[in-house]
């Protein structure tokens, strides 16, 4: 039974089709499956941009193609003044804005339940696509405009906190990177090192451990006891790994006791296209076999080793052996990688300068994760309107 304040989407939106006939616009944008606009990477040399569609602030673009295959519908509200897009994208606007805020509609489109619903309707379409008619026939909640405004303001406040948080994390990491470059890269010649410095190997810094995945035949190995990390938790450019989707039980941890990485160990992805991503372990954890962990001999090694490995992504990929499709760094190859080993006093100095920054980032990343949870809760609340 449809709730009383649910209305047909098509009664509030209309399609927009303005072409770039005078070539006045050159801000070419695309739309991601994550419902965001990005600068287009398409090669437009020789392309007639006069046929491209113009999108203006507050209008929407979407893709109705392959919705059931992707399980998501790319749709987003444009926040810049103007842009142009491929004519393949349907565009629309809310024309009854005194009854439905475009920002509120975008929140509705951001929900997992919305993607599930459009996926259901797209299943019967050609190549799993959604028809414009089915899109217009979707039911959406249209509560009183004051209520919409309150929800939007609340959501945007959380988004702003996340964005400020993200900027602060980037600034702190840039500061640490600058200190690292000044101390260990600028004016340092590997063939003529300062006194007390030498070339060393990664294996000298601690015990290298390659992770392992519990058998799928043992569901009892999973629980809520210890983080289980995979390259999936290494997205973006965070310093620490993201909250893992799975954890291990006490039974699972007992079986993999030799694989435990203590907090502030360093984890590096060592297989495939994800090769060379580096994270600091925020909790006690166990990784899968695509990650080599370093349990450090001394805490003072951690910041130096983290930023050194971060700067070596291309080199790690080059050192990896195996087929071109699946490069791989084994434990023994990983241990043999050569890096500069500074003097003990230099490690200590860098540790004292950067550890407060790293700990602050840990705090901010945790705070950001909580804000993301609040955002999800606010979106989930929309179902009960």
Image (spheres, grey):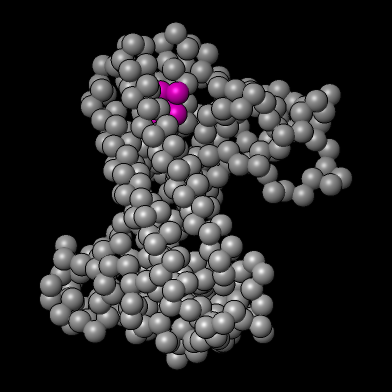
User: Where's residue 168, x and y in %?
Assistant: 45, 43
Q: Quadrant of residue 312?
A: bottom right
Q: Quadrant of the N terminus?
A: top left
Q: Which SS type dominates the magenta stretch? A: helix
Q: Quadrant of residue 141?
A: top left
Q: Nearer the viewer, residue 113 or 196?
A: 196
Q: Residue at x 56, y 66 (%)?
A: 183
Q: Is residue 266 above or below residue 26?
A: below
Q: Is residue 366 above or below residue 150?
A: below
User: Where's residue 327, x and y in %?
Assistant: 55, 81
User: Where's residue 73, x and y in %?
Assistant: 48, 41
Q: Nearer the viewer, residue 186 or 271?
A: 186
Q: Residue at x 25, y 23 (%)?
A: 385
Q: Decide if residue 329 is in sight here.
A: no
Residue 4 located left or right of residue 78: left
Q: Residue at x 40, y 82 (%)?
A: 205
Q: Residue at x 72, y 34 (%)?
A: 27
Q: Nearer the viewer, residue 376 or 75?
A: 376
Residue 74 located left or right of residue 287: right
Q: Is residue 317 above or below residue 161?
A: below
Question: The magenta stretch spans which residues?
Answer: 103-107
Q: Is residue 104 magenta?
A: yes
Q: Decide if residue 384 is in sight here.
A: yes
């Amino acid at each position: 039974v449809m709730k009383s304040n649910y209305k047909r989407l098509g009664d509030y939106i209309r399609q927009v089709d303005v072409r770039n006939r005078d070539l006045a616009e050159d801000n070419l944008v695309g739309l991601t499956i994550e419902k965001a606009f990005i600068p287009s990477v398409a090669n437009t040399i020789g392309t007639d941009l006069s046929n491209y569609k113009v999108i203006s602030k507050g209008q929407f673009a979407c893709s109705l193609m392959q919705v059931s295959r992707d399980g998501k519908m790319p749709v987003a509200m444009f926040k810049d003044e103007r842009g142009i897009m491929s004519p393949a994208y349907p565009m629309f606007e809310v024309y009854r804005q005194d009854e439905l805020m475009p920002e509120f509609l975008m929140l509705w489109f951001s929900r997992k339940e919305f993607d599930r619903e459009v996926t259901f309707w797209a299943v019967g379409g050609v190549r799993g696509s959604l028809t414009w008619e089915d899109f217009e026939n979707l039911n959406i909640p249209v509560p009183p405009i004051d209520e919409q405004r309150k929800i939007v303001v609340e959501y945007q406040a959380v988004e702003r906190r996340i964005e400020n948080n993200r900027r602060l994390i980037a600034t702190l990491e840039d500061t640490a990177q600058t200190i690292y470059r000044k101390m260990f890269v600028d004016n340092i010649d590997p063939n003529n090192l300062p006194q007390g410095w030498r070339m060393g190997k990664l294996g000298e810094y601690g015990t290298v451990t390659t992770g392992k995945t519990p058998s799928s035949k043992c569901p009892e190995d999973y629980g809520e006891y210890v983080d289980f990390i995979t390259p999936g938790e290494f997205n973006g450019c965070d310093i620490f790994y993201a909250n893992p989707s799975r954890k291990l039980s006490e039974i699972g941890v007992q079986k993999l006791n030799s694989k435990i990485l203590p907090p502030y160990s360093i984890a590096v992805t060592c297989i495939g296209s994800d090769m060379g991503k580096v994270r600091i372990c925020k909790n006690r954890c166990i990784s899968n076999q695509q990650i080599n962990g370093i349990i450090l001999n001394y805490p003072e090694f951690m910041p130096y080793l983290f930023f050194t490995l971060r700067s070596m992504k291309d080199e790690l990929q080059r050192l990896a052996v195996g087929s071109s499709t699946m490069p791989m760094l084994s434990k023994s190859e990983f241990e043999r990688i050569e890096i500069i080993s500074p003097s003990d006093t230099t490690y200590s100095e860098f540790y004292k300068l950067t550890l407060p920054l790293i700990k602050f980032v840990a705090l901010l990343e945790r705070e950001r994760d909580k804000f993301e949870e609040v955002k999800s809760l606010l979106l989930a609340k929309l179902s009960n309107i």
